[in-house]
């Protein structure tokens, strides 16, 4: 393919936009959380501007996972967060949160987003 260098396209080399979701799970929810991602709907994969996603599991025994997604730009990421695919991709986790709330329990997980532009590769 024209423009491909070492298997990387010019689009992949463009700076882009990265969103990192830090998710802390209660110990009793870790296996469920792992199951949710291992059987994910892949809905995000269909979105324009989506490049890649990694779910990083901690090696230090903590309960903080990182979900790192890369996008062409912030606009594509924001479109994802407002899309039907976002709801589809998070349906089961949202149901878990709703059920815990209905039982008067603490949420089984908490998340915090941070967004970045790529400065260098």
Image (tube, helix red, strand yellow):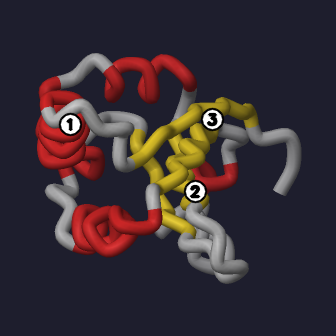
Question: Which SS class for mark 3?
Answer: strand
Q: Is residue 53 above or below residue 18?
A: below
Q: CA distance from mark 1 to mark 2?
A: 18 Å
**CA distance separating discs 1 and 3:** 25 Å
Q: Is residue 73 left or right of residue 28?
A: right
* Left or right of residue 112: residue 27: left
The quadrant holding residue 114 is top right
Residue drawn at (53%, 52%) of the image: 24
Q: Residue at x 24, y 31 (%)?
A: 104
At horizontal 48% and vertical 18% (from top left) the residue drawn is: 75
Specify few, some or many for label 3: CA neighbours under 10 Å numbering under 14, 14-19, or 20 or more.
Answer: many
36 and 25: which is toward the camera: 25
Would residue 94 be visible to someone looking at this image?
yes
How far across and down, in percent of the image, does residue 17 sit? 63, 35
Instruction: Rate crowding at label 2 as few (under 14), some (14 to 19) or many (20 or more) other CA atoms within 10 Å.
Output: some
Is any part of residue 87 visible from this angle? no
| Nearest to the observer: residue 78 or residue 25 | 25
Q: Position of residue 97 (x, y in %)?
A: 24, 37
The residue closer to the viewer here, 110 or 36, is 110
Callout 1 secondary element: helix
Q: Residue furthest front?
A: 104
- Residue carrying label 2: 66
- Farthest residue, direction right: 120
Q: On the rendered structure, is 12 left or right of 99?
A: right
**Which residue carries the number 1 mark?**
94
Q: Are marks 3 and 2 in contact (CB under 8 Å)?
A: no
Q: Residue at x 17, y 32 (%)?
A: 98
């Amino acid at each position: 393919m024209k423009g491909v260098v070492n298997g990387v396209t010019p689009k992949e080399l463009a700076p882009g936009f990265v969103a990192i979701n830090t998710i802390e799970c209660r110990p009793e929810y870790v296996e469920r959380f792992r199951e949710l991602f291992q059987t994910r709907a892949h809905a995000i994969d269909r979105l324009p501007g989506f490049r890649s996603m990694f779910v990083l599991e901690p090696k230090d025994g903590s309960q903080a996972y990182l979900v790192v997604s890369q996008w062409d730009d912030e606009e594509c990421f924001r479109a994802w967060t407002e899309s039907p695919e976002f709801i589809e991709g998070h349906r089961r986790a949202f149901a878990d949160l709703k059920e815990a709330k209905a039982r008067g329990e603490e949420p089984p997980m908490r998340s915090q987003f941070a967004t970045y532009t790529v400065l260098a590769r």
